[in-house]
Image: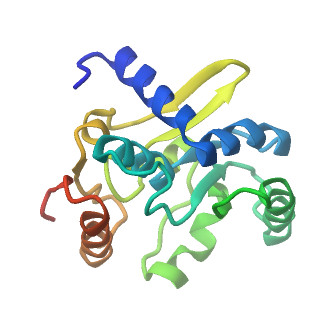
Amino acid sequence: MYRDLASQIDYLEEVLRKSPLVSDVLRLAPRLELPNWYLGAGAIAQTVWNELHGFPLEQGILDCDLVYYDEDTSYEAQEANVRRGAQLFGALPGKVDIVNEARVHLWYKQEVGKEIRQYCSTEDAISTWPTTATSVGVRYEGDKFVVFAPYGLDDLLNMVVRPNKGLITKEIYEKKATRWREVWPKLTVIDW
C-alpha cells in the first residue's frame, strides 16, 4: 500500500475524517481538556479495516477508546471525566470509553488476572495494547494530526493482526482475533 510513514499517516487521517463517529470524537475530545489524550485501539483499526473491506465505516466497532494520563489516579477524578464525556458524546451513535491510563494498574489484575506496573504515560500504555495493528493513538493538536504508533502502521494498513505479547494473554488474543476475522474476513491473523 503506502511505503513511507508520511503517506501512511495522510491515508489514516483521510480515512478517519470520513467516519462521522471517529471524526466527531476527535473534534469534540479537546473540550474535555484531558491531559495527553488519544483516541485509539479498535475504533482506529476497525475504521481502517472497514474502509479497506468496502464496509460502512462504523461496522463492527463496539466502542471508541479515549485514553489520557493524569497523575490524579482517584476513581472519583476519572468518573468525573467519564460523566463529562457522557454529556459531550451522548448524541453520537457509538459508545466512548474514557480511561485514565495512570490508574489501569489499580484494576487490571481484578479484570484480567495479571498484575501490571503503573504506566508512565499514555504512550507507554498504548505500547502494551493487544495487537500491533491496534497499538495506535491519534488526536489533533490544533490543526495538526498527531499519531502515536510504536509498531508503525504497516500491520494496520495491511490488515495484519499480530499479537503484542507484553500484556495480553493467548486466550484474550485468540478471542479478539476470532471475532475480528468474522467481521473483517480479509484480515491476516498471525498465530500466537
Question: Up-down: is 7 above or below 150?
Answer: above
Does residue 170 appear in the picture of this structure? Answer: yes
Residue 150 appears at what percent x and percent y?
A: 39, 36
Q: What residue occupies the far left of the structure in this picture?
A: 191
Q: Nearer the viewer, residue 120 or 150?
A: 150
At x 42% / y 35%, what residue is drawn?
149
Q: Nearer the viewer, residue 139 or 22?
A: 22
Q: Is residue 149 shown left or right of residue 122?
A: left
Residue 139 appears at what percent x and percent y?
A: 62, 34
Q: Which of the 4 image quarters holds residue 101?
A: bottom right
Colouring convention used in this rendered image of the protein: rainbow
Does residue 121 appear in the picture of this structure? Answer: no
Q: Which of the 4 image quarters holds residue 159?
A: top left
Q: Is residue 177 shown left or right of residue 146?
A: left
Residue 57 appears at what percent x and percent y?
A: 47, 48
Question: Up-down: is 98 above or below 1?
Answer: below
State the quadrant of the N terminus: top left
Question: Up-down: is 142 above or below 81?
Answer: above
State the quadrant of the C terminus: bottom left
Q: Nearer the viewer, residue 12 or 122?
A: 12
Residue 29 appears at what percent x and percent y?
A: 75, 43
At x 79% / y 63%, what residue is drawn?
82
**Mark count:** 0
Q: Is residue 57 shown left or right of residue 51?
A: right
At x 69% / y 18%, what residue is drawn?
143
